[in-house]
Image (tube, rainbow, N blue to C red):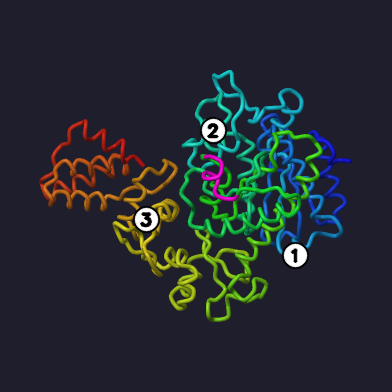
């Protein structure tokens, strides 16, 4: 029996081919690309190709052998008997072994190998932790810059071909109009079902929705074999993870239901007798999570997600907030564009109530409400922890709310964020401080300008201040350095 022992890469790939061949056209084989050592990152697509996508990937950490068995089993079960009922709502993309080089190495050389197999320049240590290699708070707390560390982040986001291939495949799907409902990175071990954030203990704006489906998965898993899974955000349940896949897909591509899960406890390679029980319980957890996410996105409180034309009924009842991708309607899996949303947000109070973030972004202007934070059109001021992402992603928000974005982004966001202080904001800061007679604070504004604008923008801002007030004085080097270090974006 295939699931009574751990299988090597060739056997898993052959099984995947067999699953697709016997699916009656329900499944097709594809690939993210090839690994550093030239192996196929084989995937299987299951479903009609026109529904929201549920994306599971396993084997990112080479020594974790239960997850590849589960991903293969999941694919097999979904296509059995003409197709699982879930396929009436969603399609699946499944990658059983995302790190094939490491997986082979763990079977043939070192069964505790975790990372990729790409050599590190000028270093005897090999490999990168592929779950620290995404462009989300890259190499901050929860990752290491030491090439010999088990959590080595790499030299830059996606500098390992395995993560770059995965990213390109999924982003290409999104760019071609597909909606990715859920992404799940399966690990071993520890019995946990975790959502974003990984990089901070702060909770994301969509945490309640994420956690609802995590709890549903945990309950379903426990009902099978009694295994209790801890549910919560990654940073709060296990530890901080910078550069992880879930935060990347959530922050950069708006995939709300992103999870990192750890299968049943024991070890990275528990006795093979655990394979089948683990597969059974994890499949039930998967079903519960997917059903929950689909219900929350397309069915709850909107008159039914399958009612075509739900956004044309003249009352806006079908909307769902889906920042940063945009507001989506019950009748479609696609997030609408702001140009389509402005009339709905303007005309219908129910849309503004249900979708405050989207309407706030699309309606413009959002309102500066310092020191409490940016205030969206429909309601209360939001905290900086929520605003950072919007200011970083949307030029329209930065333009409409420069003071708020300036305050929030100055709190230490990474260099990957594109928002900078504007010359006008530096001028305002300087004017306020001049009027208060705080000459050192004028110099602080100048240092902020240098850090945020670059030389040309800073020079223009400082010249304007000097020309209008003639009170700008040269700051001493110590003050400049101190402020630069604090405010560098």
Alpha-carbon span between mark 2 and mark 3? 30 Å
Residue hosting label 3 = 398
Q: Which numbered dot is residue 153?
A: 2
Q: Residue at x 66, y 31 (%)?
A: 36
Residue density around tag 1, few if under 14, some if 14–19, many if 20 or more, within 10 Å:
few
Residue density around tag 3, few if under 14, some if 14–19, many if 20 or more, within 10 Å:
many
Residue 469 drawn at (x, y percent)? 11, 50
Q: Residue at x 65, y 27 (%)?
A: 117
Residue furthest to the bottom? 314
Residue 78 drawn at (x, y percent)? 79, 55
- Element under disc 2: loop
- Element under disc 3: helix
Q: Quadrant of the C terminus?
A: top left
Circle 2/circle 1 CB separation < 8 Å: no
State which tag comes first along the sequence, 2 or 3.
2
Q: Residue at x 59, y 74 (%)?
A: 302
Alpha-carbon span between mark 1 and mark 3? 41 Å
Q: Quadrant of the N terminus?
A: top right
Residue 468 drawn at (x, y percent)? 13, 51
Residue hosting label 1 = 88
């Amino acid at each position: 029996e295939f699931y009574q022992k751990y299988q090597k890469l060739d056997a898993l790939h052959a099984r995947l081919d067999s699953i697709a061949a016997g699916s009656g056209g329900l499944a097709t084989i594809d690939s993210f690309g090839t690994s550093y050592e030239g192996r196929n990152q084989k995937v299987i697509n299951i479903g009609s190709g026109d529904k929201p996508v549920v994306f599971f990937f396993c084997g990112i950490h080479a020594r974790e052998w239960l997850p590849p068995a589960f991903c293969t089993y999941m694919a097999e079960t979904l296509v059995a008997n003409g197709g699982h009922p879930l396929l009436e709502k969603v399609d699946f993309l499944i990658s059983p072994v995302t790190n094939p080089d490491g997986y082979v190495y763990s079977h043939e050389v070192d069964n505790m190998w975790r990372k990729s197999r790409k050599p590190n320049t000028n270093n005897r240590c090999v490999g990168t932790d592929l779950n620290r290699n995404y462009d989300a708070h890259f190499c901050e707390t929860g990752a290491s810059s030491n090439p010999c560390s088990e959590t080595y982040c790499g030299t830059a986001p996606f500098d390992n071909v395995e993560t770059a291939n995965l990213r390109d495949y999924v982003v290409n799907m999104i760019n071609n109009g597909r909606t990715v409902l859920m992404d799940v990175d399966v690990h071993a071990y520890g019995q946990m079902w975790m959502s974003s954030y990984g990089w901070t203990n702060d909770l994301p704006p969509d945490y309640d929705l994420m956690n609802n489906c995590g709890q549903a998965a945990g309950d379903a898993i426990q009902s099978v074999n009694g295994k209790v899974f801890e549910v919560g955000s990654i940073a709060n349940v296990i530890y901080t993870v910078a550069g992880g896949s879930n935060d990347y897909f959530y922050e950069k591509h708006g995939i709300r239901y992103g999870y990192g899960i750890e299968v049943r406890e024991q070890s990275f390679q528990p006795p093979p007798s655990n394979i089948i029980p683990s597969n059974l319980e994890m499949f039930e957890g998967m079903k519960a999570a997917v059903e929950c996410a689909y219900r929350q996105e397309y069915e709850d409180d909107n008159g039914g997600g399958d009612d075509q034309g739900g956004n044309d009924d003249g009352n806006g009842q079908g909307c769902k907030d889906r920042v940063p991708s945009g507001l989506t309607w019950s009748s479609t899996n696609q997030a609408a564009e702001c140009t389509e949303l402005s009339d709905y947000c303007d005309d219908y109070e129910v849309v503004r109530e249900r979708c405050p973030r989207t309407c706030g972004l699309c309606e413009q202007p959002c309102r500066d409400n310092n020191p409490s934070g940016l205030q969206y059109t429909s309601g209360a001021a939001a905290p900086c922890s929520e605003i950072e992402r919007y200011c970083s992603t949307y030029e329209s928000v930065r333009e409409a709310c420069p003071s708020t974005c300036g305050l929030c982004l100055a709190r230490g966001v990474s260099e990957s964020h594109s928002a900078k202080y504007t010359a006008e904001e530096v001028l305002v800061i300087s004017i306020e401080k001049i009027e208060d007679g705080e000459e050192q604070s004028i110099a602080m504004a100048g240092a902020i300008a240098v850090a945020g604008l670059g030389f040309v923008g800073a020079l223009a801002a400082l010249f304007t201040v000097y020309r209008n007030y003639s009170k700008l004085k040269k700051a001493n080097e110590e003050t400049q350095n101190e402020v630069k270090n604090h405010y560098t974006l």
